[in-house]
Amino acid sequence: MRQSHFFCKTLKTNPKEGDAISHKLLLRGNFISQLASGVYSFLPLGLRAHRNIEKIIREEIEKIGGQEVLLPSLQPKEIWLKTKRWDEMDPPLFRVKDRHSKEFALGPTHEEVITGLVKLAIQSYKDLPVALYQIQTKFRNEMRFYGGLMRAREFIMKDLYSFHADKDDLEKFFNKAIGAYEAIFNRCGLKAIKSEASGGIFTKENTYEFQILSEGGEDTIFYCENGDFAQNREIAKVTAGIKCPKCSGTIKEGKSIEVGNIFRFGTVYSEKMKVQFTDASGKKQLVYFGSYGIGLTRLVGTLVELFHDDRGIVWPKVAAPYQAHLIDLRSNLQKGDSAERFALYEKLQKAGIEVLYDDRADISAGEKFADADLIGIPIRLVVSARVDQGKVEVKKRNEQESKIMAVEEAINLIN
Amino acid sequence: MRQSHFFCKTLKTNPKEGDAISHKLLLRGNFISQLASGVYSFLPLGLRAHRNIEKIIREEIEKIGGQEVLLPSLQPKEIWLKTKRWDEMDPPLFRVKDRHSKEFALGPTHEEVITGLVKLAIQSYKDLPVALYQIQTKFRNEMRFYGGLMRAREFIMKDLYSFHADKDDLEKFFNKAIGAYEAIFNRCGLKAIKSEASGGIFTKENTYEFQILSEGGEDTIFYCENGDFAQNREIAKVTAGIKCPKCSGTIKEGKSIEVGNIFRFGTVYSEKMKVQFTDASGKKQLVYFGSYGIGLTRLVGTLVELFHDDRGIVWPKVAAPYQAHLIDLRSNLQKGDSAERFALYEKLQKAGIEVLYDDRADISAGEKFADADLIGIPIRLVVSARVDQGKVEVKKRNEQESKIMAVEEAINLIN
């Protein structure tokens, strides 16, 4: 993408708005734009990062058998009455009436919809297990918004739901889901701590949150320094400084961001929604049910919260909106459409590299470098009068030193 | 995908629900499921077809310079008051209140949001032109719903918006957009008729709808048999049987489905939203604005409306949820996990073919064939005791005759 044509207007300094560093940097780098409190537009740079994370999530969820669907946001009141959550949800539901005076919730989650859907499709034990997921917009009527993408009112989640013939099979899938979540967060460069948490109103089974330690987080967890135990403060039976109940390690306390959660609901929803199947002996049985969420929008914010420095974002390679940022400082070539001007840009694209090409004229080298640091693409390539033909000056965003190398060598480095 | 594990429960006969054949077939083939009137879930088969069309649209819109964004559904009342559409929209807006008693519309379109967004980013003529698009969920508070995906209350649109320094530049882009739309519909196997239509309350300029002739359509157009003239009945100055005003052809009348529309709004929105830029001479000017929609969800329905027979859907290759449907009739192999059982399925996958593998045991050949015809994947491959090792029986969905050929030959046919 030629930056001269790119819809991206960065700010020179951090904006006043924004109560988290990720919020400030994402606004300043024009990754997102605020439409209302807790309601954001994803601009081209931000959407590209988002899509990269989507891809990772899809791959890992499909590996454990998740099949993708797309469920509606408009959810009839009746299904929420069945689970008694119409009035109970916290935060409360966004509600909307149609022209026939029928009431709908704007879906903050899809347990009601998916159990209703699966109920229609499942007759026999042969139809189980089933795991369905979606990457879809949620609406949460928060009283208070925080940190831009960290707690928004409209945001995108990956939500996965699984249905099983018995508790053992749910348990097996639950463990697979833990594995998938660990793979997803690892691939994003994050160390997620699986923390015990409250199951909410519907289950006393242990549920888990996936927490990322970060000063920008709203949660607090107590966790063992050896990584084999963690609890959310809300339910914690430990405190900082004591010995871990599982090993000889010491318990620490840390602020953290919840990026995922997984619930073994057992038969609670099936009872309320009457989701049954016929087992091998011909008897009706309730379906076992699990629910697994990842706050995708929040995950984008979390990456920025963790990976930045005082000059801007330092995207991990897998999430970066582009693989390389080509900065053109050849003032003699910055106007016109000469083949020489675009040769390197085209060569990189032909090598399969997604490259943002800063071809802007009348912008100083300093401004271009500042924008590159702010946007945070992992590898910066500079062409200038000082660099010989066929070579390029390469600097990684997370390193200080630049190095002049042959273009082919740079391509190998990026790929 | 192994069909024994696939979330797809077909019905043996057309359901009673559904007032359009596409609606009946999509329900019966379990491509979609109804949650409420005019509100549908996309199930795995349906979502795959949807995604294929998304991909075509992205490619063509990016070719003309569209940059992808993702804008919110929750749209503050104030921006709708600015354009005076808060009370004027038809159908009326879905409205929702937050916990601070602030009102929002659920976006049925994004002119207000996008002009507000671009207003923040545009200062100089150098920032123009800009073309932004999204593939995103819309909400329309219809009184009456029709034909399943044909007129829903929640659906996905591709909406593109372009901003220009002057009328000529808008005109140039408008023509490019027409080209992109023609390419999109052509690639889907559809012959779209560009029909003159009313511009609504905001423009007297000719706008165009892209109409597909179909008995299942809700619109009526008058069009020249030679293809150089068409008008929507709502504004038509011609009738069937007369001579075309542009050529010697005859005007015909036909029912049709509107799959896209394009508007040259000029400076109407810029005036209301005060979107200005500084021109080369330093003077403030209003931005010229165009808006271009494709009803993506409706397009899925339209394809089924046009491409089906009495046994089911006949997907065009580009939209088909899978490229090949492998039907396994080897009753001796249909249980267990022998390498022999999966050899062909794996070979096809290794050849890069997206294949739905009907490996279901205890289902008759007749049922499998009926499902295959209903689902409508373009190429059916059958392995059975009757077919020699290394060969496969190949039948195209839109042909009667099957043919036994070497697997390699079948792979070439599919790719």
Image (spheres, coloured by chain):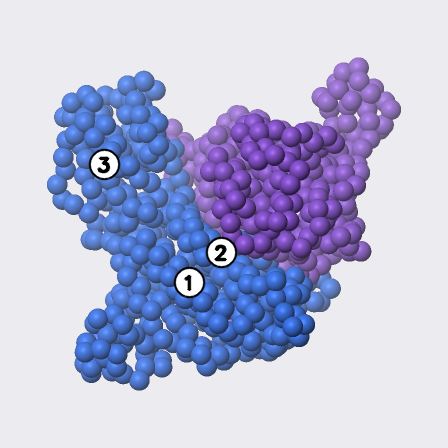
Chain colours: A purple, B blue
Q: Tell me which corner region of the image, top left, top right, bottom left or bottom right, holds residue B360.
A: top left
Vertical side of B363 occupied by A334: above or below: below
What's the CA distance linking mark 1 and mark 3?
34 Å
Circles 2 and 3 in contact, beta carbons < 8 Å? no
Residue drawn at the location 45% of the way across and 57% of the way down: B64
Q: Amino acid at mark 2?
A: Gly
Q: Which residue is mark 3?
A: B413
Residue drawn at the location 28% of the way across and 19% of the way down: B340
Q: Tell me which corner region of the image, top left, top right, bottom left or bottom right, holds residue A196.
A: top right
Residue drawn at the location 31% of the way across and 25% of the way down: B347
**Quick one: A251 or A100, which is closer to the camera?**
A251
Residue A278, can we see it? no
Vertical side of B315 occupied by B346: above or below: above
Circles 1 and 3 in contact, beta carbons < 8 Å? no
Q: Where the C terminus of chain B falls, by quadrant?
A: top left
Residue drawn at the location 80% of the way across and 33% of the way down: A254
Circles 1 and 2 in contact, beta carbons < 8 Å? yes
Chain letter belonging to callout 1: B
Q: Earlier in the sequence, mark 1 or mark 3?
A: 1
Q: Is residue B45 left or right of residue A79?
A: left
Q: Amino acid at mark 3?
A: Leu
Which is closer to the viewer, label 2 or label 3? 2
Q: Tell me which corner region of the image, top left, top right, bottom left or bottom right, holds residue A390.
A: top right
x then y, percent, for residue B68: 53, 53
The image's mark for residue A272 is none
Q: Where the N terminus of chain B falls, by quadrant?
A: top left
Q: Which residue is mark 1?
A: B176
The image's mark for residue B65 is 2
Vertical side of B382 occupied by B49: above or below: below
Q: Are marks 1 and 3 on the same chain?
A: yes
Q: Is residue A32 left or right of residue B41?
A: right
What's the CA distance linking mark 1 and mark 2?
10 Å
